[in-house]
Amino acid sequence: MHESRAATVISTTPFDDQKPGTSGLRKSVPAFRKPHYVENFVQSVFDSLSDHAGKTLVVGGDGRFFNAEAIQIILRMACANGIARVLVGRGGLLSTPAVSNLIRKHRAYGGFVLSASHNPGGPDGDFGIKYNISNGGPAPESLTEAIYANSRRIARYLTVETPDVDLGKLGPQSLEGMTIEVIDPVTDYAALMEQLFDFGAIGALLRSPGFRMRFDAMHAITGPYAKAILEDRLGAPAGTVVNAVPLPDFGGHHPDPNLVHAAELVAATQGPDGLDFGAASDGDGDRNMILGRDCFVTPSDSLAIIAAHADLVPGYAGRLAGVARSMPTSRAADRVAEALGVAAFETPTGWKFFGNLLDAGKVTFCGEESFGTGSDHVREKDGLWAVLYWLNVLAKTGKPVRDLLAEHWRTYGRDYYSRHDYEGLDKAAAETLMADLRAADLEGKSLAGRTVILHDDFAYTDPVNGEHTAGQGVRIGFDDGARVVFRLSGTGTSGATLRIYLEHYEPDPARQHAETQAVLADLIAVAKAVSGVEARTGRTAPDVVT
Ligand code: VG1
Ligand code: CO
């Protein structure tokens, strides 16, 4: 503790549910509002760090309900725990990739990101807290385990008794000897984007009357970023960015950029009068969806196409080191890596597993099937980055999204891909389903005319530091390249969510333009049969298909 500060020591008792999941601690707002709940978790983070006294932190969130209260709690506790300086976005707002950039650019010790990402917000919605380390990325497993262990034995937390800090006014102020620097949330991020992309070419495309696009910020954090970059700097017509004002409840919607929750945007890209380009981002700005006229780019394909076109993008030309994807993401990117002679890595789900690969310079691009793509420019996935990357490629090739996709499939083959989610399942039933799937004897069996050549529970050994992570999802691989993967979500806040990932590889260009669900129908039937999901849960169909 910093000796000159008058920290107050408050007694507390542990909660037993503060184990960070795929992306930080995520719970309902009522759970977070329990007395001492936020404080216990934040103190458990500080108790897991060792040399944070006198250092700088970055703090910000996606503006959802409870963001403002949580930030005040964190600022007081940072002060009491000896932090020297905190950078906070004005109004407490910062997108997740912007936090990552600020940590790196200002050589901060770490940062707190307040968000439950794509989960709905509001008094009955969800909230979340995530701690990021000095490389700008999510805390690795070893640290989240330590945080959880501390949360199980916490007996006190440190705070200071001060009035709320005014986060509306830019510039430095002092809180009991700690400096709080309120910064514009967009400036540093926009400068980074300008370094990476050909703003001249993108601006010309956006201003040309023949090109019509829309970016849907879904009433979440990317509104101010997209407006500043696409409209103000690049000259896209006013109104290109819609739902641009972040709202505490995201207008009552799921801020989740996918075919289900961004249906209006999808509709605007369809038909002869459809937009040339549509894009959306999620609650905290790290996800993206890419649409062309009458076409949708799966996130797995997006990663592959991004990697294949690196030479068209100033920040990446001539320096592609490798590509990494989460295990359930399709193998499309692996094929590009192979063709280009660079390494491909398969990691567990969650961006924290990409950090070491990026730090070691082993990979340049990373992606997840869950609408996440990013690069070594920060240590988080980055929604607006992906949108600008696509615009850069469109501007340089002069081709519509549809043609780029078709060309890509012709060259590398197409991975028909879909994820089926069963939400709000009974936890015990979902865990039994997974245990039975793990124990099943499938190798060598013939299912719907395909032979099972791989059946395992995915485990990963980090090639940089040797950390081992097991139990990351059941994979069933077939002799024709098809694959079905099962795992339980680590970001949900009630019951269990079963995710079934389905993919079928089609090398024949004549068969690359069919409807995805129809192509996957037999694999869907196999997935249902081997898991028994319907009989076990009483469900007849998934809740969300993406
Ligand atoms: C989901 C996605 C995963 C992603 C995570 C955080 O996790 O599947 O790929 O990294 O969300 O994304 P899970 O455990 O529910 O499958 V974000 O934008 O919600 O921070
Ligand atoms: Co997110």
Image (cartoon, grey):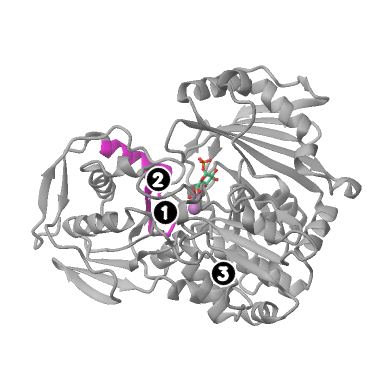
Q: Is residue 350 above or below residue 281?
A: above
Is label 1's Cβ within 8 Å of ligand 2? no
Q: Which numbered dot is residue 241?
A: 3
* Alpha carbon separation for disc pair 3 and 2: 25 Å
Q: Which numbered dot is residue 249?
A: 1
Q: Quadrant of the C terminus?
A: top right
In the rendered structure, the answer to whether residue 120 lies left or right of residue 303 reads left
Which of the marked residues, 3 or 2, is nearer the chain's N terminus?
2
Q: Amino acid at mark 2?
A: Gly
Q: Amino acid at mark 1?
A: Asp
Q: Is residue 132 magenta?
A: yes
User: What is the secondary structure assignment of the residue under circle 1?
Assistant: loop
The residue carrying mark 2 is 125
- The residue located at (10%, 59%) in the rendering is 3
Q: Quadrant of the N terminus?
A: bottom left
Q: Which residues are magenta?
A: 126-151
